């Protein structure tokens, strides 16, 4: 599904994208400090840890028969019915979200249920690549694009969801086999996305300024489209513009460098938490429905301030932090490299399990929720874990209801169906 590759892109680009892009295009590097160089150094070792973890997780099983079974058919559970099932769950969650978003625990579960609209689109692309089935893909696009557009016109957040675009691009170009031409096609797919992102950033001000409030959604879309198209037609992008976009949207090396400078005190004593951030974050794992007076876990802005020394912020601007920020706060570069290796091994093993899953629905659906938590990017580990647990619990209940009361809805999850479908494939590989 491309989730592990997406996770690798998110983590590595958070600390190396601006530097790598600038080095390739020969841009000025006055912004690089000794603290930045420290970030680049441990990020390079972390990239090697990513590759090693992915290789170890995806390497062939020592049991030859088990390996044949695993490779007999990828995504045996992806059928037209499953795509419609995922789209249905996502549509229900999307419709209910405005009414339940502020309800503790329930709001989180509803938001995660709405994410199944995106998952339905991704599985529709997989089904099209496997069997050429076009109808589910067209229906998925017809549902996903209007939902993303309405959300963007209401909030000002980008409709170009990275965890959807990159996964779809990887599936479309690399699912059946990976060749040099696959990377050419992947590059061709991503170039227009960059231009669309520039157009969006240049025109989203009309939404965030409140200028469109009070208009019906159709009128909002028309007015925004006029501004968006005009910006695209007059768009002129230079290498420095791209690097600026990286600093604004992707690269977090400045914050990571501030953390490096702060963690070592003038007296030479380190200020590492040594696992303290994970212990503090355990509070987030407990649902507020079970602990009504649960203390609020520090938000990203406060979290960044605590480990960079910048102090509390006076505004409500959100700050995204990559996972290496928290890992470094607990013990410096060794913690970053070791933590990245563990996270990527878990992600790659989970993705391999999902791709070859021949278990029941109540096993697959929670696994998908945990996998998609990696696709969304990990910032504070325990906060992401609490969200993934909430999503897994929600879909586990839904899966059990389907298995008990509506077993004919998704018959491919019956053990007999798996054995029947795997038999010819296994014999073909023998």
Image (cartoon, rainbow, N blue to C red):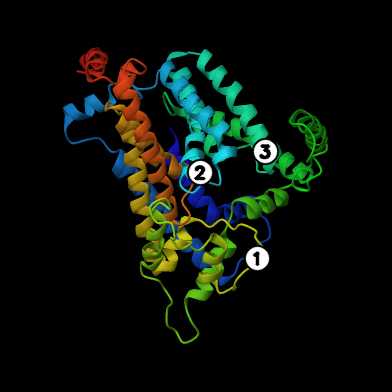
> Mark 2 near mark 1, Cβ–Cβ under 8 Å?
no
Rendering quarter of residue 370: top left
> Circle 3 sits on which residue?
152
Q: Nearer the viewer, residue 55 or 195?
A: 195
Residue 132 in the image: x percent, y percent? 47, 13
Under circle 3, the secondary element is helix
Mark 1 or 3, closer to the camera? 3
> Circle 2 sits on which residue?
107
Sequence-earlier tag: 2 or 3: 2
Under circle 2, the secondary element is helix
Sequence-earlier tag: 2 or 1: 1
> Mark 2 near mark 3, Cβ–Cβ under 8 Å?
no
Q: CA distance from mark 1 to mark 3?
A: 33 Å
Q: Residue furthest front?
A: 292
Position of residue 263 in the picture relative to residue 70 (left or right):
right
Residue 191: tell me if it is visible. Answer: yes
> Circle 1 sits on which residue?
31
């Amino acid at each position: 599904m491309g989730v592990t590759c997406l996770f690798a892109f998110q983590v590595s680009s958070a600390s190396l994208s601006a530097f790598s892009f600038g080095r390739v295009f020969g841009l000025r590097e006055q912004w690089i400090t000794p603290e930045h160089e420290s970030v680049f150094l441990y990020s390079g070792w972390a990239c090697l840890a990513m590759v090693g973890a992915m290789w170890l997780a995806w390497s062939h099983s020592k049991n030859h028969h088990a390996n044949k079974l695993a490779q007999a058919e990828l995504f045996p559970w992806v059928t037209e019915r499953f795509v419609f099932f995922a789209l249905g769950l996502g549509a229900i969650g999307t419709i209910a979200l405005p009414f339940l978003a502020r309800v503790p625990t329930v709001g989180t579960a509803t938001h995660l249920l709405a994410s199944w609209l995106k998952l339905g689109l991704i599985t529709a692309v997989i089904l099209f690549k496997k069997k050429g089935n076009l109808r589910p893909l067209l229906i998925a696009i017809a549902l996903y694009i209007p939902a993303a557009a309405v959300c963007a016109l209401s909030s000002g957040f980008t409709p170009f969801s990275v965890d959807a675009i990159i996964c779809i691009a990887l599936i479309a170009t690399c699912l059946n086999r990976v060749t040099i031409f696959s990377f050419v096609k992947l590059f061709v797919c991503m170039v227009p996305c960059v231009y669309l992102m520039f157009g969006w950033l240049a025109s989203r001000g009309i939404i965030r300024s409140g200028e469109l409030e009070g208009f019906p959604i159709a009128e909002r879309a028309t007015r925004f489209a006029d501004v968006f198209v005009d910006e695209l037609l007059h768009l002129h992008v230079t290498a420095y513009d791209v690097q600026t976009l990286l600093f604004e949207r992707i690269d977090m090396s400045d914050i990571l460098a501030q953390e490096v400078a702060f963690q070592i005190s003038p007296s030479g004593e380190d200020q590492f938490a040594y696992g303290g951030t994970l212990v503090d974050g355990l509070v987030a794992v407990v649902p507020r429905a079970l602990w009504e007076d649960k203390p609020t876990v520090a938000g990203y802005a406060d979290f960044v301030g605590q480990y960079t020394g910048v102090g509390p912020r006076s505004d409500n601007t959100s700050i995204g932090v990559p996972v290496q920020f928290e890992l470094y706060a607990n013990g410096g570069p060794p913690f970053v490299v070791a933590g990245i290796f563990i996270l990527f091994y878990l992600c790659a093993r989970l993705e391999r399990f999902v791709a070859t899953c021949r278990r029941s629905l109540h096993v697959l659906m929670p696994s998908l929720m945990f996998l998609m938590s990696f696709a969304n990017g990990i910032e504070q580990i325990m906060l992401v874990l609490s969200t993934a647990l909430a999503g897994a619990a929600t879909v586990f209940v839904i899966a059990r209801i389907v298995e008990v009361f509506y077993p004919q809805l998704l018959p491919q999850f019956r053990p007999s169906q798996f054995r029947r479908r795997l038999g010819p494939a296994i014999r073909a590989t023998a």
